[in-house]
């Protein structure tokens, strides 16, 4: 039974999400703020965290940074669910390490579908890449020249996709469909943000931009 943690300061929101996801067969725990949420992550060990952006004390971006700073949490899927739908809020959420960003209000039916889509992409396939870079999809670990590199989930999935066919150009829409899913709506800058973060961690020359088309992993 997938375990989902809801971190939101609005009791009504927590209850609506809890009710619908419990009915769909998920094990649910909730937290009313960021600090409580981080404690629940250690004890509850969720597969997925649904996280509000604006909360008193510690906002969602800071919570997400905290989650991603611990390598033990690397396999946790983090999804923002926020009333803030400006581009800069979405970019901030994705850059903090989130896997997806959904806007309130969202119907319970659509949310359940999104949650299923996010959890479905958990994979246990191991892939090998070019010498100097290796990836273990079961443990969600990447090594670059023998050094372990911690990647947020979507950066990890993006790198795994591009490395499937070295020197093959993946079109932007194909990347969106394969990494985020065709039923997930994300902003135009989503891929660019994740590519930039990947280059910072595995090397600027490993991923090449093909203007007007997409990206490829350079062998």
Image (cartoon, rainbow, N blue to C red):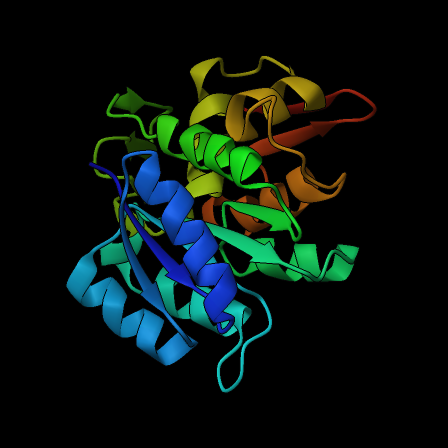
Q: Say if 44 sits above or below 129 in the image.
A: below
User: In this rendering, would 44 be left or right of 206?
Assistant: left
User: In this rendering, would 49 be left or right of 198?
Assistant: left
Q: Is residue 39 visible?
A: yes
Image quarter where the N terminus lies is top left
- From the top left corner, tell me how far across and down residue 154 is, in percent: 48, 40
| Quarter holding residue 218 | top right
At horizontal 26% and vertical 52% (from top left) the residue drawn is 46
Q: Residue furthest bottom?
A: 57
Residue situated in front as seen by the camera: 64 or 3: 3
Q: Residue furthest left?
A: 43
Residue situated in front as seen by the camera: 35 or 157: 35
Q: Is residue 219 visible?
A: no
| Quarter holding residue 89 | bottom right
Q: Say if 173 sits above or below 6 in the image.
A: above
Residue situated in front as seen by the camera: 150 or 68: 68
- Give the number of callouts: 0
Q: Say if 69 sits above or below 139 in the image.
A: below
- From the top left corner, tell me how far across and down residue 50 is, in percent: 44, 54
- From the top left corner, tell me how far across and down residue 197 is, in percent: 56, 50
- From the top left corner, tell me how far across and down residue 120 is, in percent: 37, 26
At horizontal 46% and vertical 69% (from top left) the residue drawn is 11
User: In this rendering, would 105 be left or right of 23?
Assistant: right
Q: Residue furthest right?
A: 212
At horizontal 21% and vertical 38% (from top left) the residue drawn is 139
Residue situated in front as seen by the camera: 63 or 212: 63
At horizontal 25% and vertical 73% (from top left) the residue drawn is 39
User: In this rendering, would 51 be left or right of 211?
Assistant: left
């Amino acid at each position: 039974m997938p375990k989902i943690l809801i971190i939101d300061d609005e009791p009504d929101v927590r209850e609506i999400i809890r009710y619908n996801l419990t009915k769909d067969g998920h094990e649910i725990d909730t937290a009313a703020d960021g600090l409580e949420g981080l404690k629940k992550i250690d004890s509850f060990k969720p597969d997925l965290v649904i996280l509000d952006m604006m909360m008193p004390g510690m906002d969602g971006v800071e919570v997400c940074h905290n989650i991603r700073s611990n390598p033990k949490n690397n396999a946790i899927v983090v999804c923002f669910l926020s009333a803030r739908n400006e581009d800069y809020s979405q970019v901030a959420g994705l850059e903090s390490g989130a896997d997806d960003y959904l806007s309130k209000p969202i119907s319970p039916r659509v949310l359940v579908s999104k949650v299923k889509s996010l959890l479905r992409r958990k994979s246990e396939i191991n892939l090998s890449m070019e010498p100097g870079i290796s990836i273990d999809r079961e443990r969600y670990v990447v090594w670059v020249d023998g050094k372990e590199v911690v990647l947020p989930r979507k950066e990890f999935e993006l790198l795994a996709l591009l490395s499937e066919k070295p020197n093959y150009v993946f079109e932007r829409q194909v990347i969106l469909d394969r990494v985020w899913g065709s039923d997930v709506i994300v902003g135009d800058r989503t891929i660019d943000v994740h590519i930039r973060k990947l280059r910072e961690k595995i090397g600027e020359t490993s991923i090449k931009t093909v203007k007007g088309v997409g990206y490829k992993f350079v062998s």
